[in-house]
């Protein structure tokens, strides 16, 4: 790989030209909430007139940016059935944070990526979405993160909702500086190396391979500045054999599967043994305690989330059952019931990015209230499982 100055025009450091045999790749590192980046992307594409423009987007993110009414096509019931509520919530939090910062500069997140696609289409240039599916990225990152680091990540995400950081183009220019970004990436890597691998390193490889396969000999690639150095480092190496592996969603480990079935197995066996040792009456009393210990906290969680009465009832009824199987949690059952009875309207989808940053917004916005139902009923069921399980086990051995 050789970096050469482009012969026709001079560009800032945010633009790097890479020669790969007879193919020239012009890599543009952008900030997703920067008007300067948007203007630069438009300028480079119009001046260079490449055969293909590669963009750091997957199909889902591109649809979200390009279709203003994309929320109308979101099937929440299907999201719940596929157990993707957590992924959707993380996406909303990240989008909200970027939108909040972008609002200070009068530009929405990802504008430069959408601009790249629009300018390319206007000039009859091929567009290649070169990023990995965001759902795969998030699930691989979550799977690779230790339990303690998961808590750290969740705390960081929650903190970002209420962050009051002010930013301007000057600060964005500083962040785009390669030395600052390299230091930031190294810091993330030292604290959470496995998470960084899934969020950054694997995507660097994925995008580099996609860029290399783009049609034409002149390519413009528009990526976030945080990926620029990583792509430069791997683009001259053949990593095509890794693509299949990094597109997989890792299966749940055997240890977690065993742990998931261990608690319900212990509870059921304990109830049977209590029945054998102390009679059916004692077993029935302990079963009743289990139902109340699970149902009441889960129902309280639904009430705290201002859930529909049917949702509160489903929380009480489902928690004692779902706690005995790792296949589905009480949170998914109650979220589904909530969607059926109080579905959010389009306006609430459109305002969710701003509502998510305020405490009252979580209860006023029906979409966010579904997440509250999901989280609080799930927590209630978890508490009930430990309380009920402890009581039953101590009754067995006493």
Image (cartoon, rainbow, N blue to C red):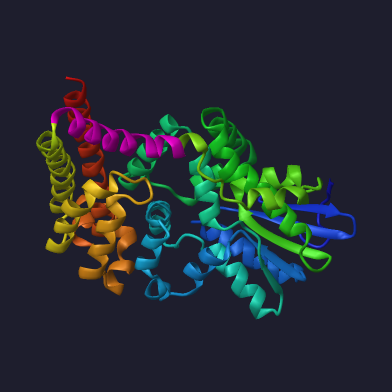
Residue nearer the viewer, 208 or 145: 145
Residue 339 sits in which quadrant?
bottom left
The stretch of residues the image draws in magenta is 257-278
Residue 237 sits in which quadrant?
top right
What residue is at 38 percent from the left and 62 percent from the top?
81
Image quadrant in which the C terminus is located:
top left
Farthest residue to the right: give it.
Answer: 22
70 in relation to 315, above or below: below
112 in relation to 358, above or below: below
Residue 301 is situated, as x and y percent measured from the top left of the image, at: 17, 48
Residue nearer the viewer, 194 or 261: 261
Does residue 32 appear in the picture of this structure?
yes
Residue nearer the viewer, 82 or 12: 82
Residue 148 is situated, as x and y percent measured from the top left of the image, at: 41, 30
Magenta region includes residue 269: yes
What residue is at 55 percent from the left and 42 percent from the top?
174
What residue is at 69 percent from the left and 79 percent from the top?
123
Magenta region includes residue 258: yes
Compared across the picture, whether 226 is left or right of 100 comes to right
What predominant SS class does the magenta segment belong to?
A: helix
Residue 16 is situated, as x and y percent measured from the top left of the image, at: 73, 51
Does residue 367 appear in the picture of this structure?
no
Residue 235 is situated, as x and y percent measured from the top left of the image, at: 77, 48
Compared across the picture, whether 316 is left or right of 372 comes to left
């Amino acid at each position: 790989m050789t970096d050469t100055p482009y012969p026709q025009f001079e560009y800032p450091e945010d633009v790097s030209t890479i020669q790969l045999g007879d193919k020239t790749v012009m890599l543009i590192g952008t900030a997703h909430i920067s008007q300067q980046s948007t203007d630069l992307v438009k300028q480079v594409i119009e001046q260079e007139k490449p055969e293909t423009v590669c963009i750091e987007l997957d199909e889902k993110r591109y649809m979200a940016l390009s279709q203003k009414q994309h929320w109308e096509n979101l099937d929440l019931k299907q999201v719940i059935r596929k157990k993707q509520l957590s992924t959707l919530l993380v996406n909303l939090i990240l989008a909200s944070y970027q939108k909040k910062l972008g609002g200070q500069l009068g530009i929405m997140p990802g504008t430069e990526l959408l601009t790249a696609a629009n300018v390319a289409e206007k000039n009859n240039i091929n567009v290649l979405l070169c990023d990995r599916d965001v759902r795969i990225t998030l699930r691989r990152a979550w799977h690779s993160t230790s339990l303690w680091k998961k808590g750290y990540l969740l705390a960081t995400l929650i903190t970002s909702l209420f962050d009051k950081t002010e930013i301007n183009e000057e600060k964005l220019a500083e962040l785009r500086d390669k030395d600052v970004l390299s230091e930031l990436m190294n810091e993330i890597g030292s604290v959470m190396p496995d998470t960084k691998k899934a969020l950054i390193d694997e995507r660097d490889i994925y995008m580099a391979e996609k860029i290399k396969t783009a049609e034409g000999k002149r390519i413009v690639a528009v990526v976030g500045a945080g990926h620029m150095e990583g792509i430069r480092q791997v683009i001259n190496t053949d990593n095509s054999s890794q693509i299949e592996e990094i597109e997989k969603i890792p299966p749940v480990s055997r240890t977690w599967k065993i742990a998931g079935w261990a608690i319900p197995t212990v509870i059921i066996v304990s109830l049977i043994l209590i029945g054998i040792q102390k009679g059916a009456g004692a077993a029935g009393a302990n079963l009743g305690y289990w139902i109340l210990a699970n149902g009441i906290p889960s129902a309280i969680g639904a009430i705290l989330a201002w859930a529909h009465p049917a949702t509160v009832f489903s929380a009480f009824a489902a928690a004692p059952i779902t706690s005995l199987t790792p296949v589905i949690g009480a949170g998914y059952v109650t979220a589904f019931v909530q969607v059926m009875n109080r579905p959010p309207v389009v306006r609430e989808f459109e305002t969710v990015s701003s509502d998510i940053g305020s405490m009252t917004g979580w209860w006023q916005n029906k979409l966010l209230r579904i997440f509250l139902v999901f989280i609080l009923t799930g927590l209630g069921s978890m508490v009930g499982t430990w309380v009920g399980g402890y009581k039953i086990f101590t009754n067995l051995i006493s």
